Image: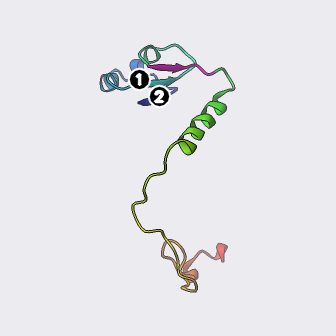
Protein backbone atom coordinates (compact mmCIF):
# COMPACT_ATOMS: atom_id res chain seq x y z
CA UNK A 1 0.00 0.00 0.00
CA UNK A 2 1.32 3.42 -0.98
CA UNK A 3 -0.11 6.67 0.39
CA UNK A 4 0.19 9.69 -1.90
CA UNK A 5 -0.89 13.00 -0.42
CA UNK A 6 -1.15 15.92 -2.84
CA UNK A 7 1.04 14.15 -5.38
CA UNK A 8 0.22 13.36 -8.98
CA UNK A 9 3.05 11.18 -10.31
CA UNK A 10 0.96 10.07 -13.31
CA UNK A 11 1.43 13.58 -14.75
CA UNK A 12 4.61 14.79 -13.07
CA UNK A 13 6.67 11.58 -13.07
CA UNK A 14 5.19 8.92 -15.37
CA UNK A 15 8.08 6.43 -14.97
CA UNK A 16 7.28 6.16 -11.25
CA UNK A 17 3.77 4.97 -12.04
CA UNK A 18 5.26 1.88 -13.71
CA UNK A 19 6.79 0.94 -10.35
CA UNK A 20 3.51 1.60 -8.52
CA UNK A 21 1.44 -0.48 -10.93
CA UNK A 22 1.13 -3.49 -8.60
CA UNK A 23 0.74 -1.46 -5.38
CA UNK A 24 -2.54 -0.49 -3.80
CA UNK A 25 -2.61 3.29 -4.04
CA UNK A 26 -4.37 5.55 -1.57
CA UNK A 27 -4.48 9.08 -2.98
CA UNK A 28 -5.35 12.14 -0.92
CA UNK A 29 -6.08 14.96 -3.32
CA UNK A 30 -9.13 17.18 -3.74
CA UNK A 31 -8.74 17.02 -7.53
CA UNK A 32 -9.64 14.07 -9.72
CA UNK A 33 -6.28 13.32 -11.34
CA UNK A 34 -4.88 10.51 -13.44
CA UNK A 35 -3.16 9.15 -10.32
CA UNK A 36 -6.44 9.27 -8.38
CA UNK A 37 -8.18 7.38 -11.18
CA UNK A 38 -5.74 4.48 -10.80
CA UNK A 39 -5.98 4.42 -6.99
CA UNK A 40 -7.73 1.78 -4.92
CA UNK A 41 -8.96 4.60 -2.67
CA UNK A 42 -9.25 8.30 -3.50
CA UNK A 43 -9.86 10.62 -0.54
CA UNK A 44 -11.09 14.07 -1.56
CA UNK A 45 -10.86 16.24 1.56
CA UNK A 46 -12.95 19.39 1.64
CA UNK A 47 -11.09 22.66 2.19
CA UNK A 48 -10.15 23.07 5.84
CA UNK A 49 -10.36 19.37 6.72
CA UNK A 50 -6.73 18.49 6.01
CA UNK A 51 -5.72 18.65 9.68
CA UNK A 52 -8.55 16.35 10.78
CA UNK A 53 -7.54 13.82 8.12
CA UNK A 54 -3.86 13.91 9.09
CA UNK A 55 -4.67 13.61 12.80
CA UNK A 56 -6.91 10.63 12.06
CA UNK A 57 -4.15 8.91 10.09
CA UNK A 58 -1.66 9.67 12.87
CA UNK A 59 -4.06 8.18 15.42
CA UNK A 60 -4.30 4.97 13.39
CA UNK A 61 -0.51 4.81 13.03
CA UNK A 62 0.14 5.32 16.75
CA UNK A 63 -2.77 3.53 18.43
CA UNK A 64 -3.63 0.71 16.03
CA UNK A 65 -0.10 -0.27 15.01
CA UNK A 66 1.75 -2.69 17.30
CA UNK A 67 5.06 -1.39 18.62
CA UNK A 68 8.19 -2.69 16.93
CA UNK A 69 10.91 -4.46 18.85
CA UNK A 70 13.79 -2.33 20.00
CA UNK A 71 17.12 -3.03 18.34
CA UNK A 72 19.37 -2.30 21.28
CA UNK A 73 19.58 -1.89 25.02
CA UNK A 74 17.83 1.12 26.52
CA UNK A 75 20.01 4.17 26.93
CA UNK A 76 20.58 5.09 30.55
CA UNK A 77 23.02 7.28 32.41
CA UNK A 78 24.30 6.14 35.80
CA UNK A 79 23.50 8.61 38.55
CA UNK A 80 26.38 10.82 39.53
CA UNK A 81 28.47 9.98 36.47
CA UNK A 82 28.51 13.60 35.33
CA UNK A 83 27.68 12.46 31.81
CA UNK A 84 24.76 13.72 29.79
CA UNK A 85 22.95 11.78 27.07
CA UNK A 86 25.03 11.82 23.92
CA UNK A 87 28.28 11.25 25.80
CA UNK A 88 29.00 14.89 26.73
CA UNK A 89 30.06 15.79 30.24
CA UNK A 90 28.25 18.54 32.11
CA UNK A 91 31.34 20.76 31.90
CA UNK A 92 31.46 20.57 28.08
CA UNK A 93 27.87 21.72 27.64
CA UNK A 94 27.05 25.12 26.24
CA UNK A 95 27.14 27.88 28.91
CA UNK A 96 23.58 28.80 27.95
CA UNK A 97 22.27 25.52 29.36
CA UNK A 98 24.33 25.41 32.58
> x, y (%) of residue 17?
34, 22
Q: Residues within 10 Å of mark 2 (few under 14, many from 20)?
A: some
* Magenta-highlighted residues: 40-45
Q: Is residue 6 magenta?
A: no
- Quarter of the view holding residue 72: bottom left
Q: Which image quadrant: the C terminus?
A: bottom right
Circle 1 crowding by C-alpha within 10 Å: few under 14, some 14–19, many from 20 = some
- Camera-near label (2 vs 1) is 2
Residue 30: horizontal and vertical position, in percent?
A: 58, 18
The number of discs equals 2
Residue 21 horizontal side relative to residue 86, left or right: left
Q: Which mark is residue 53?
A: none
Assign the N terminus to one quadrant of the image.
top left
Which residue is at 47% across, 17% downward?
36
50 w.r.t. 98: above or below:
above
Specify the farthest residue to the right: 48
Report helix, strand or loop for mark 1. helix
Position of 64 relative to 76 (above/below)? above
Q: Position of residue 32 (x, y in %)?
A: 52, 13
Which one is earlier in the sequence, the residue at label 2 or at label 1?
A: 2
The disc placed on residue 9 is: 1
* Residue 4 marker: 2
- Is residue 36 depicted above or below 4 in this figure? above
Asked if disc 2 and disc 1 are in contact, CB closer than 8 Å, the reply is yes
| Image-based side of 70 in relation to 45, left or right | left
Q: Residue 84 placed where, x, y %?
A: 55, 76
SS class of the residue under badge 2?
strand
Pick the front one: 75 or 67: 67
Amino acid sequence: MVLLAGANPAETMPPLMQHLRDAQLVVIDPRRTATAESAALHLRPAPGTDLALVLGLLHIAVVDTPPTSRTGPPVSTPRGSGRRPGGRSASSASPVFQ
